[in-house]
Image (cartoon, rainbow, N blue to C red):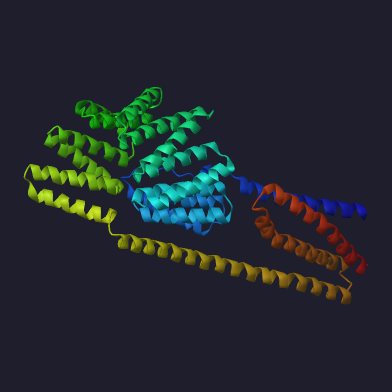
Amino acid sequence: MEQKEIQTTMKHFLLLCISILITITSWAQSDSNNNASYDSLNDINWNRKYVADLLNKIEKQEDNEEKVIAYLNIVSKYDFYKKDSAIIYSLKALKLSEKINSDKGKIRALDFLRMEFTSIGNYFEAIKAGIAQLEIAEKIKDSSKILNAYYGLSLSYNESKDYATSLKYSIKLKEYAAAIKNKSLKDFYYINAITNIGDNFMNLNKIDSALNYFNQAYQISLGLTESEKYIPLGNLGEINFKLKNYEIALSYYKQCISKEAQSYIDREKLSYFFQAIANTFFVLNKKDSSLHYAKLAYTSSKESQYQKGILQSSEKISEIFKEIKKFDSAFFYQDVFIKTKDSLFNDEKIRIQENFSFREEIRQNELEEKAKEDAIERNTNIKLGFIAFFIPSFGIGVFLIGLRNRKNIKIIVTLSLASLLMLFEFISMVIHPFIEKLTHHDAILMYIILLVVAFILIPIQHKLENFVKNKFK
């Protein structure tokens, strides 16, 4: 009898260990399968279908890292054509990451928020997200995330025209990147830091310092890949334009829009270079060439919904058409310029109204999600209540039948033991979510607590099993 009891104990113990192992393994799975590939901007319908498929998948997912990644993949698609939705799903990813205590998810969501808010000109929210991102990166001491946060903040401050603060973060980025051992990280962030420092010096009208840093960046880029050369080239074009070396500026700009370069430059940057060439030709009084590149800048900006690019290119096109006395076309593009300017730089009242509407949309989405969560929780509680009612009812029923009828004593004992097993498995199932919450999904702590629970429950279970066996002897 004792040997059988030991064997039974070992079986239950092994089953418990296996269930714990499955929990740990499922949590530790890599998210690499969920990384979606980017599609071309020309295929917006594909992006919409991809988003719809992901949203259907999310409906069935539990709150975990995979769901965060799915939200962020949606953001990456909406970024192409629907900035407000990109922000909403970035906020969803951030909220879920906070709920499951995922620093990695929080950092990625905040980085997307910084980029999206910068893109629509809401620099206050962009910088707030960037600073929060940096604080988490520093807390977890992740070098690559710290570098990315410094880089992002330097860009957002630069876009907001706070060049002095942008310069401060660019210098921090340079110093931090110089101390990194990982060569690929060092190369990427160091050259971007040098470039950003030069750009900020140029905007602060410190031309000699700017030229020095731009030349440094270009020399470093010669040893890197082709895709890392266009920014230093573009900056050399810009500094030469300021120095009125227009032909030299053109030669640098044209390298940035070569066929090869267009395969890896994003549309916003491409629009910027087209616009820069248009401005240079305009100064050189080559109106036809200027108009050609301004139209290219306008088309590229429209495709990527780059409002700043639409504003600048439409203004330049209108100006050229006025000079060549094509007034109908001039008025058309002037109208585009005015409407774009209104959407970007409207009264503070409109900005407040937009923010209110945006926050209300987020609130409504949160209420919908809360209603779904409450429905799921209610359904789960009903099922748990049914199980909680069924197990003791079944056990008591079997016990009473056994007392009255001892003919099929083996079946009665088996059913009694089954009811006990159901009871203890039910206890394990109920306490499991509380243990997850208590340990913040820490696999080692979960394992230790479940092990302790097993050592408490298994002896109690065996005492009750012996009671049942002795009762029906």
List x then y, in percent, for residue 392: 77, 71
- Looking at the image, residue 258 sits to the left or right of residue 405; the answer is left
* Above or below, comparing residue 159 to residue 185 in the picture: below
- Looking at the image, residue 12 sits to the left or right of residue 308; the answer is right
Figure quadrant of the N terminus? bottom right
Most extreme residue toward the left, as rendered? 325
Residue 135: tell me if it is visible.
yes
Residue 15: tell me if it is visible.
no
- Looking at the image, residue 248 sits to the left or right of residue 286; the answer is right
Determine the residue positioned at 63% across, 71% down.
Answer: 382
Question: Which of the 4 image quadrants contains residue 409?
Answer: bottom right
Please state which of residues 3 and 111 is positioned toward the viewer in this rendering: 111
Determine the residue positioned at 27% across, 56% down.
Answer: 343
Most extreme residue toward the bottom, as rendered? 404
Figure quadrant of the C terminus? bottom right
* Above or below, comparing residue 353 to residue 105 in the picture: below
- Looking at the image, residue 281 sits to the left or right of residue 133; the answer is left
Please state which of residues 388 and 172 is positioned toward the viewer in this rendering: 172
Question: Which of the 4 image quadrants contains residue 422?
Answer: bottom right
List x then y, in percent, for residue 394: 77, 72
List x then y, in percent, for residue 78: 38, 51
Determine the residue positioned at 86% across, 69% down.
Answer: 408
Determine the residue positioned at 34% across, 34% down.
Answer: 201
List x then y, in percent, for residue 300: 26, 43
